[in-house]
Amino acid sequence: MHFTAFVTLALAAPVVHTWGDLGHRTVGYLAEKHLTVGALTLFGRLLANENNHDYSDAATWADTVKRSMPWSRGFHYINPEKDDPPTTCHVSWPSDCPKSGCVVSAIANYTSIVLDTRQPLIQRKNATMFIMHLIGDLHQPLHAVGWKTGGNEVKPLCWKRTPPAGQVRCGGDLNLHEVWDTRLAHTLRGLPISLDNGREKRAAAEWADDLFSRQRAAGLVGGKSECDELGTTKCIVGWTAESNALVCSHVLKRGEQWILRNDLSEEYFDENWETVDHQIGLAGLRLAAWMNAIALATSGRGKDL
Ligand SMILES: *[C@@H]1O[C@H](CO)[C@@H](O)[C@H](O)[C@H]1NC(C)=O
Ligand SMILES: *[C@@H]1O[C@H](CO)[C@@H](O)[C@H](O)[C@H]1NC(C)=O
């Protein structure tokens, strides 16, 4: 009896992943490269730890506390109500955000906590790590859509090409959310799906270097972004709507039936890897602008921060 109840619960609980750690780590490292001296000082102090944890670890922290802080689970996404992709993609603010919170309200909440220099350091540290993760998450199109639990229910899918070799996986339980979190990113970087910690961090650092040089060549440098209005949700809602629109234009362009029937590591990969690369780059740049703006707004406030 108890066992049955447990199994039912376990099956009912949606498995929600986020950009795999590779993506989040890359966003963390990329943001670090764009930080001003003031931001490096502030966040160097706030994120200080004895475990050699760096910006990429800070960006993955929020996924590690989903169990101990279950109320934070809903902060990783938003489920717009009037959505019907691929026909209609739309985010309504604030009606699409439940009282319990969503990615937009959580970023706003944690921003006000980091800005409040009277808050204890640990609060501001955790808030910083939430922001570093959640700005990454909202750039993953399937975190900005409620359709089929953000694509988690679209399965089983087929993905045959998993570099460097081996690991053919079709008809397992691979779902569309996971394809966008992990498969596209690892494949575009020429990486196998599982990496040990050290290799994952090196791969993320290389991806961040690569994105940073392309952004610099395009004139996008430290802290310049279209949005740094910390006091409002306007920018965050705009980024979320942009991400949501990608569900209609890219994620579901071919329709669900096509997705269920094809090896997604072929044409689907070819059509979508640039979007992943672009979104990770944008997330890192925007996160940096956000952090730079926080540093600017708090400079001169508080004793030494
Ligand atoms: C704001 O963050 C705090 C600290 O994690 C949390 O307890 C609270 O529920 C959050 N509030 C909202 C509205 O998200
Ligand atoms: C901050 O996060 C740690 C886990 O990394 C947790 O133990 C601690 O309670 C959190 N503190 C606050 C104030 O949220």
Image (tube, rainbow, N blue to C red):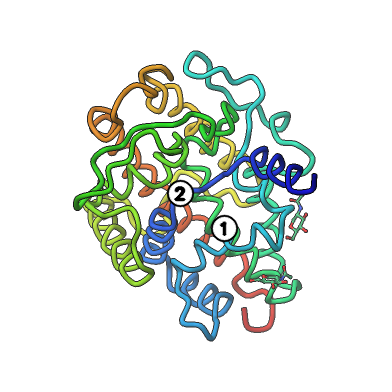
- Residue 183 relative to residue 290: left or right: left
> Split into 4 quadrants, where in the image is the N terminus?
top right
Residue that badge 2 annotates: 19
Mark 1: few, some, or many residues within 10 Å (few <14, many ≥20)? some
Marks 2 and 1, the one that precedes in the sequence: 2
Residue placed at 32% from the left, 42% from the top? 184
Q: Is residue 86 above or below residue 17?
A: above
Ligand 1 is in which quadrant of the figure? bottom right
> Split into 4 quadrants, where in the image is the C terminus?
bottom right
Q: How many marks?
A: 2
Task: Residue 4 in the image: state x and y as whole percent.
Answer: 73, 42
- Residue 303 relative to residue 154: left or right: right
Please name the amino acid that badge 2 sits on. Trp
Which of the pair 65/257 is nearer the observer?
257
Q: Cα distance, mark 2 to mark 1?
A: 10 Å
Task: Residue 292 in the image: state x and y as whole percent.
Answer: 50, 62
Q: Is residue 19 above or below residue 55?
A: above
Q: Which mark is residue 194?
A: none
Which of the pair 27/301 is nearer the observer?
27
Residue that badge 1 annotates: 63
User: Residue pushed farthest bottom?
Assistant: 50
Task: Residue 107 in the image: state x and y as whole percent.
Answer: 63, 51
Q: Secondary structure at mark 2?
A: loop
Task: Residue 73 in the image: state x and y as whole percent.
Answer: 66, 50
Please name the amino acid that badge 1 sits on. Asp
- Residue 133 relative to residue 69: left or right: left
Task: Tell me if the residue at label 2 has its CB under 8 Å from ligand 2.
Answer: no
Q: Secondary structure at mark 1?
A: helix
Mark 2: few, some, or many residues within 10 Å (few <14, many ≥20)? many
